[in-house]
Amino acid sequence: MTEHELQTARLREWIEERAGTVGEDTPLLEERRINSLQLVELVLFIEELTGTCVQPERLVPGSFHSIRRIRECFLDTAATQEDRHA
């Protein structure tokens, strides 16, 4: 399992512990699967996973729509940056 796959699995586990079973595209905020306090915790968890700070301009609701969007907005970009530094 690659680091990126491990991060994605940990993200899914974190979300499902709080929101129950969800699909890749389940609307997390619109369906109130995660609340505002959990959203702050999620940002901190993403920073822990990626080892980078989440930039304030990336903190828009669309970035947290679903597991897929979170992965695309935060984990995929972190993996790309790691590849550039390798």
Image (tube, rainbow, N blue to C red):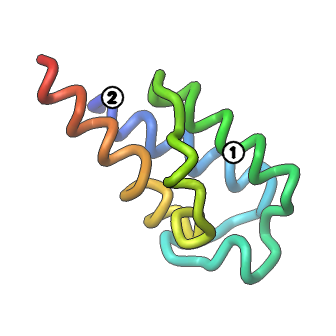
Residue extending farthest to the bottom is 30
x, y percent for residue 47: 56, 31
Residue extending farthest to the top is 86
x, y percent for residue 69: 46, 65
Q: Nearer the viewer, mark 2 or mark 1?
A: 1
x, y percent for residue 16: 70, 55
Q: Are marks 2 and 1 in contact (CB under 8 Å)?
A: no
Which amino acid type is marked by label 2? Glu
Identify the residue position indicated by label 2 in the image: 3
Figure quadrant of residue 46: top right
Which amino acid type is marked by label 1? Leu
Marks 2 and 1 sit apart, C-alpha to C-alpha, by 19 Å
In the foreground, 53 or 15: 53
Which mark sits nearer the N-terminus, 2 or 1?
Answer: 2
Q: Quadrant of the N terminus?
A: top left
Q: Residue at 63% across / 46% down in the picture? A: 13
Q: Residue at 15% across / 29% down in the picture? A: 83
